[in-house]
Image (tube, grey):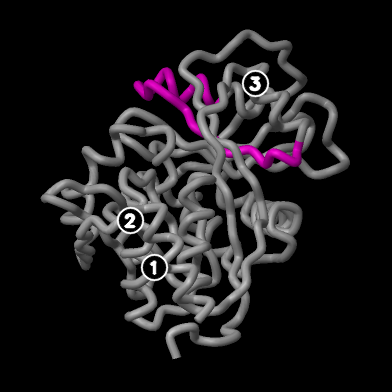
């Protein structure tokens, strides 16, 4: 009953527009369908665009059944959804919030066990409400992030050292630092760090700031037609407060702009006041907030 009452409440908020969910199996076909919609707000969709780009260029990187979907009404896309199991659901900006319920229902009908959702703050909250109404689960708001965009690198005082490409010789160090980053950012090692490092090395996306020894790491790759996405950025505790991360990100941002990118994008954790400050010094401007919700294990099926 509680679930039905919640759904009725969502209907009252979002209306009863007829929504049609369309799924895609081919990433290239999916991209052709959604590119105009995603590019209309490129900064807000930089993560989705980056993942689609990876799926097209490196189709063997993810060995799982992808969830690639659009929601349309009257022939117009109003929402885009993506999921690479076992990861969380990703949602685009949503033009008609009735699409939130349509996506939730489609996933629920498919008996997908979602660990959570990542999206713009309003969309993430709305989907969480719809999913809890259908499943009887509980949720927890985790990381609260902010997307930033840069189109010009501001002059800064550079620290000692220089930016260089990471190489295979750095592999063990890179894996250790990826694991350390995962622990700090997500609370635990994700378990895919070696594969991530191998992929980023092969794509020549990984850079190190080299002083007398490597002191900071940054990953940057062309992720959208007009921009590059920077992240992760990690400096071990013993090397912090020396300006390494600031110089590292500034140098790579300039390289990417010089290669023809119009913008660079990155995510910051709103709880990390230091990173939000240093990136603004470089020239990154806030665009929007991005929230990460986790769902509990199944408690009850509200439709039962």
| Residue 282 on the magenta span | no
Towards the viewer: 241 or 216: 241
Q: Which marked residue is nearer to the observer: mark 2 or mark 3?
A: 2
Q: Is residue 117 above or below residue 79?
A: below
Element under label 1?
Answer: helix
Towards the viewer: 39 or 17: 17
Question: On residue 280, which mark appears?
Answer: 3
The tag earlier along the polypeptide, 2 or 3, is: 2
Q: Which residues are magenta?
A: 252-272
Towards the viewer: 299 or 242: 299
Residue furthest bottom as drawn: 304
Residue furthest left as drawn: 75
| Residue 257 on the magenta span | yes
- Distance from disc 2 to disc 3, alpha carbons, whole Å, reads 36 Å
- Disc 2 marks which residue? 98
Query: Residue 110 location in percent, x, y?
Result: 33, 80
Residue in the image at 56% along x and 22% along y? 285
- Distance from disc 1 to disc 3, alpha carbons, whole Å, reads 36 Å
Query: Residue 213 location in percent, x, y?
Result: 77, 37
Towards the viewer: 68 or 266: 68
Question: On residue 104, which mark appears?
Answer: 1
Badge 2 vs badge 3, beta-carbon distance below 8 Å: no
Q: Is residue 247 above or below residue 223?
A: above
Residue in the image at 56% along x and 26% along y? 286
Element under label 3?
Answer: helix
């Amino acid at each position: 009953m509680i679930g039905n009452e919640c759904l009725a409440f969502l209907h009252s908020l979002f209306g009863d527009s007829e929504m049609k969910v369309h799924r895609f199996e081919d990433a290239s076909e999916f991209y052709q369908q959604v590119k105009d919609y995603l590019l209309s707000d490129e900064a807000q969709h930089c993560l989705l665009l980056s993942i689609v780009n990876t799926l097209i260029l490196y189709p063997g990187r993810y060995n799982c059944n992808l969830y690639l979907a659009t929601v349309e009404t009257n022939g117009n896309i109003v929402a885009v959804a993506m999921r690479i199991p076992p990861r969380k659901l990703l949602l685009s900006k949503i033009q008609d919030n009735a699409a939130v319920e349509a996506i939730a229902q489609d996933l629920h009908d498919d008996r997908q066990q979602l660990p959570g959702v990542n999206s713009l703050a309003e969309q993430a909250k709305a989907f969480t409400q719809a999913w809890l109404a259908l499943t009887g689960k509980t949720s927890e708001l985790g990381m609260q992030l902010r997307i930033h965009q840069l189109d010009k690198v501001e002059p800064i005082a550079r620290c000692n050292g220089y930016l260089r490409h990471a190489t295979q010789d750095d592999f063990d160090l890179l894996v250790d630092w990826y694991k350390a980053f995962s622990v700090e950012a997500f609370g635990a090692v994700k378990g895919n760090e070696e594969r991530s490092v191998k992929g980023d090395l092969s794509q020549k996306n990984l850079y190190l700031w080299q002083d007398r020894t490597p002191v900071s790491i940054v990953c940057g790759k062309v992720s959208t037609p007009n921009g590059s996405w920077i992240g992760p950025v990690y400096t071990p505790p013993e090397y912090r407060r020396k300006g390494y991360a600031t110089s590292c990100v500034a140098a790579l941002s300039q390289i990417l702009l010089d290669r023809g990118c119009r913008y660079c994008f990155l995510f910051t954790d709103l709880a990390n006041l230091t990173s939000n400050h240093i990136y603004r010094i470089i020239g990154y401007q806030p665009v929007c907030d991005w929230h990460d919700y986790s769902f509990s294990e199944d408690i009850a099926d509200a439709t039962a």
